[in-house]
Amino acid sequence: MVEQQPSKLHPTFQKYSYLLTLTSLRGFRLGTFYGILCGARDSDRSGRILVVSLNGEDKVAIIDVDTRKVLRKASVGNGPVQVYVTPDGKAALVANQGSAAKPDNRVSVVAIEDGKLIRNVTVGKGAHGIVIARDGRTAYVTNTYANTISAIDLGSLSAGKSYPVGKGPNGIAAR
């Protein structure tokens, strides 16, 4: 079950954000997450879908905000962290960081409609932050343990060049 609580974010972002508490069917609290609505849409819903990384399960949860239900879970790589929904709302890019002892080096591309894995794209070790460029053709991911960022061509879902950026890159934004 998902409980929606008022957001404590800046008023500019409040209509797009939610603080969610996930609770199992037996009433155990699974965790609390901040979520930003990313524009993912199911054809028969209002478009208020969240995609949440479940680091401890190596999955993502696809949640309908209106019904407060987890629609489906999808298996991804080891230690998923950041999620970014494609501009068309059909897929989610999931950065799989893994751990320092066992880093992952993949970005999982998951279909939101059915939760199926479309493809894993190999990037640098410790994939973490992810963003899609304004033109919607390229995604960029920070690779925390490789000290690089990698480009992903969204048309072919293939890795492009990687660029050294300094020690432990984490978050990323595009303008």
Image: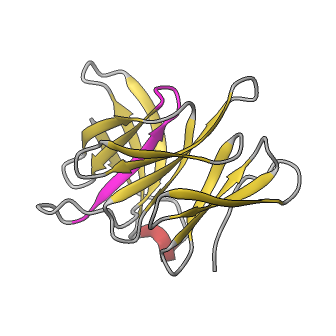
Give the farthest residue toward the right. 166
Q: Nearer the viewer, residue 136 or 25?
A: 136
Report the number of numbered marks. Answer: 0
Q: In the image, what residue occupies the spot 33% across and 49% down? A: 4
Percent position (x, y) of residue 123? Answer: 64, 48
Quarter of the figure that contains the N terminus: top left
Percent position (x, y) of residue 64? Answer: 25, 51
Q: Is residue 31 above or below residue 92?
A: above
Percent position (x, y) of residue 134? Answer: 53, 80
Q: Is residue 35 left or right of residue 146?
A: left
Q: Is residue 101 above or below residue 38?
A: above
Segment tinted magenta in the rendering: 47-58
Quarter of the figure that contains the C terminus: bottom right
Quarter holding residue 48:
bottom left
Give the farthest residue toward the top. 26
Q: Is residue 46 left or right of residue 125?
A: left
Q: Is residue 156 left or right of residue 23?
A: right
Q: In the image, what residue occupies the spot 79% across and 44% down? A: 146
Q: Is residue 56 above or below residue 73?
A: above
Q: Nearer the viewer, residue 69 or 106?
A: 106
Percent position (x, y) of residue 26? Answer: 26, 18
- Way the structure is coloured: secondary structure
Q: Nearer the viewer, residue 92 or 157?
A: 157
Asked if the magenta segment contains residue 83, the reply would be: no
